[in-house]
Image (cartoon, rainbow, N blue to C red):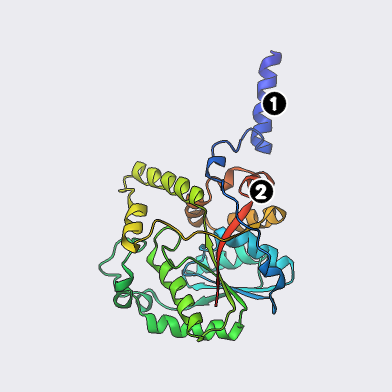
């Protein structure tokens, strides 16, 4: 009888405190590499940062760094392309404790892309040579230039411009566009910080994602096809890391503030984040990684 009651107490504790869950199943996806700790952000002035992304949830892998900057007094804004009213509201809610301003480029889908009638999977990689045909680049550029210059960031955060994280052409388009506009001095950041994974994170997380896609009846080869399409081995190498353990709760609250569908997508690339407490989870996934480009 005593053993039964002990089992019941144990089950209750597991349910109420999440203490029976371990990190063993997800720690394999954490970075094994080490890079120099970023010191550049400490010296930059004026302290104005803007995140420029295609989709509302694209800043998940850099959200801890953004929260740190905001705590240090940086003025931080994010701009993405509008979705539904529900998703826009979720983005505003998610960001309210880690940055100052959420902005949207209000383009209709057909104003953004020309292939919506023929493309079923918009996240499939597209050769860069076709970007000018698929995307209305002049319209998109005009909107970005106006909004970015009105904020005048010293630092812009984006995804990488080589494979856009996992191959989504809209990620690549926006990150490449920011870089091109900065080099041309049409916008005037001093630095671009591109959010990337380490090789170990990238390989293990994307292998997991491919296996899950196959189990759901999809080809599961999207990652390999994206690398072939863009002619790369994966994301570019980071050259700095930022420790985010001191903003673990802020980052977790940000991730969990999204709607159910977006949380599921985030879980592809931040494995099982909803299954663990913030401090425990981000003691393992304790760093964010960036490639810095000086303009």
- Separation of marks 2 and 1 at Cα, in angstroms: 24 Å
Residue in view at x 67 percent, y 69 percent: 41
Q: Which residue is mark 1?
A: 9
- Residue 189 screen position, x and y as percent: 58, 79
Hey, which residue is sitting farthest left in the picture?
118
Image position of 129 (left or right of 147): left
Q: Which quadrant of the figure contains the C terminus?
A: bottom right
Q: Nearer the viewer, residue 1 or 200?
A: 200
Element under disc 1 = helix
Image position of 237 (left or right of 122): right
- Residue 174 screen position, x and y as percent: 45, 73
In the displayed structure, would residue 243 be above or below residue 92?
above
Q: Residues within 10 Å of mark 2 (few under 14, many from 20)?
A: some
> Earlier along the polypeptide chain: callout 2 or callout 1?
1
Q: Residues within 10 Å of mark 1 (few under 14, many from 20)?
A: few
Answer with the quarter of the image where residue 177 lies.
bottom left
- Residue 290 screen position, x and y as percent: 56, 62
Residue in view at x 38 percent, y 66 percent: 169
Label annotation for residue 58:
none
Q: Is residue 40 visible?
A: yes
Element under disc 2 = helix
Q: Is residue 257 visible?
A: no
Residue in view at x 32 percent, y 50 percent: 221
Viewer-nearest of discs 2 and 1: 2
Q: Which quadrant of the figure contains the N terminus?
A: top right
Q: Nearer the viewer, residue 152 or 12?
A: 152
Tag 2 near tag 1, CB within 8 Å: no
Residue in view at x 35 percent, y 44 percent: 216
Q: Which residue is mark 2?
A: 278
């Amino acid at each position: 009888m005593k053993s039964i009651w002990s089992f019941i107490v144990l089950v209750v504790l597991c349910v109420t405190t999440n203490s029976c869950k371990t990190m063993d199943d997800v720690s394999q996806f954490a970075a094994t590499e080490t890079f120099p700790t970023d010191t550049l952000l400490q010296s930059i002035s004026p302290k104005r940062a803007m995140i420029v992304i295609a989709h509302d949830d694209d800043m998940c892998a850099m959200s801890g760094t953004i929260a740190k900057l905001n705590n240090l007094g940086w003025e931080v804004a994010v701009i993405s392309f509008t979705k539904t009213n529900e998703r826009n509201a979720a983005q505003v809610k998610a960001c309210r404790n880690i940055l100052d301003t959420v902005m949207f480029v209000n383009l209709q889908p057909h104003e953004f892309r020309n292939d919506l009638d023929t493309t079923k999977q918009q996240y499939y990689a597209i050769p860069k040579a076709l970007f000018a045909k698929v995307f209305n680049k002049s319209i998109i550029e005009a909107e970005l230039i106006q909004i970015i210059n009105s904020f005048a960031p010293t630092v812009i955060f984006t995804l990488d411009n080589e494979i856009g994280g996992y191959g989504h052409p809209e990620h690549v388009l926006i990150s490449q566009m920011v870089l091109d506009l900065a080099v041309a001095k049409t916008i005037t950041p001093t630095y671009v910080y591109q959010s990337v994974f380490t090789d170990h994170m990238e390989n293990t997380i994307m292998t997991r994602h491919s296996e899950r896609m196959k189990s759901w009846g999809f080809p599961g080869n999207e990652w390999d096809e994206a690398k072939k399409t863009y002619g790369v081995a994966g994301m570019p190498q980071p050259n700095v890391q930022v420790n985010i353990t001191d903003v673990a709760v802020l980052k977790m609250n940000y991730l969990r503030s999204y709607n159910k569908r977006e949380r599921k997508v985030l879980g592809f690339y931040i494995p099982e984040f909803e299954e663990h407490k913030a401090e425990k989870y981000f003691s393992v996934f304790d760093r964010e990684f960036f490639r810095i480009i000086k303009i």
